[in-house]
Image: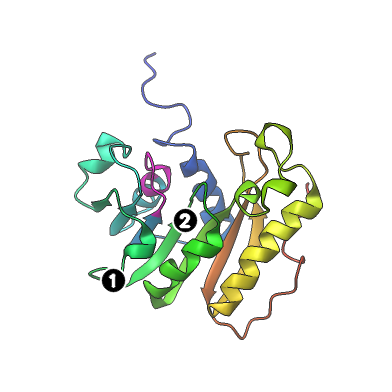
Amino acid sequence: IEVTGDPIGYVGRGGLKLQGALDRFGIDPAGRVCLDVGASTGGFTDCLLRRGARRVYAVDVGRDQLHPSLRQDPRVVVMEETDIRSVAALPEPVELAAVDVSFISLTLVLPAVARLLAPAGQIVALIKPQFEVGPGGVGKGGIVRDPAQHRLAVDRVLRLAAELGLACLRVIDSPILGTEGNREFLAWFVPGANLAHREGAAVPDRE
């Protein structure tokens, strides 16, 4: 028996996180124009392509990180050394955006993503408390352990989203922890400010 490839099934761990969100939220990327913000090695992009995405714009501030198999895929538009905040427009509206950024708050990134979204578009964003709560909320080893800080991190992102006219339909725990062991969350946003956000209500309890 010959075993090849990464045992996680994707080019990066992010693929497992997005897979969990797509399954739990009931989102089908098939035939859609997608945006991967914070593409890195391409875990999210890989997952989107495997689910039938028509095209994926893979945006990252770094360079030479995207897996060669994705770089060579004609469905992938590689946008490396690119800050999403500097992208004024794309050739086509984004029907599904998947966001996984580090060392920056989602509140600084979501406005740029929202303006690229199609009227009926959707956003799946990975909320990383260690980049939302500030130094005071991060414990030893860079881990956020206090559930109150988790709630604060999620609320901060959801409040900003509401200001952008985005409604949060659901928040779930990421199916796997972050690389350093942090609890992370996946949020599902759609245009529609008329859907109210109840502060704190979206943070799931541990099962």
Vertical arrangement, residue 151 with respect to residue 183, above or below: below
Residue beneath the point at 24% across and 42% down: 71
Q: Which residues are magenta?
A: 37-46
State how far apart marks 1 and 2 are (Cα): 17 Å
**Quadrant housing the N terminus:** top left
Inspect this view and state whether residue 58 appears.
yes
Residue type, numbered disc 2:
Val
**Disc 1 crowd, CA 10 A, few/some/many (<14, 14-19, 20+):** some
Which residue was labeled with disc 2? 99
Asked if residue 147 lies left or right of residue 49, the reply is: right
Vertical arrangement, residue 89 with respect to residue 185, above or below: below
Which residue was labeled with disc 1? 89
| Residue 40 colored in magenta in the image | yes
Vertical arrangement, residue 18 with respect to residue 33, above or below: above
Point out the residue furthest to the top here.
1
Write down the quadrant of residue 145 in the picture: top right
Asked if residue 91 lies left or right of residue 9, the reply is: left
| Residue 193 colored in magenta in the image | no
Write down the quadrant of residue 88 in the picture: bottom left
Write down the quadrant of residue 28 in the picture: bottom left
Residue beneath the point at 47% across and 62% down: 109
- Mark in front: 1 vs 2: 1
Find numbered disc 1 in the image and state the secondary structure of the residue it sits on: loop
Find numbered disc 2 in the image and state the secondary structure of the residue it sits on: strand
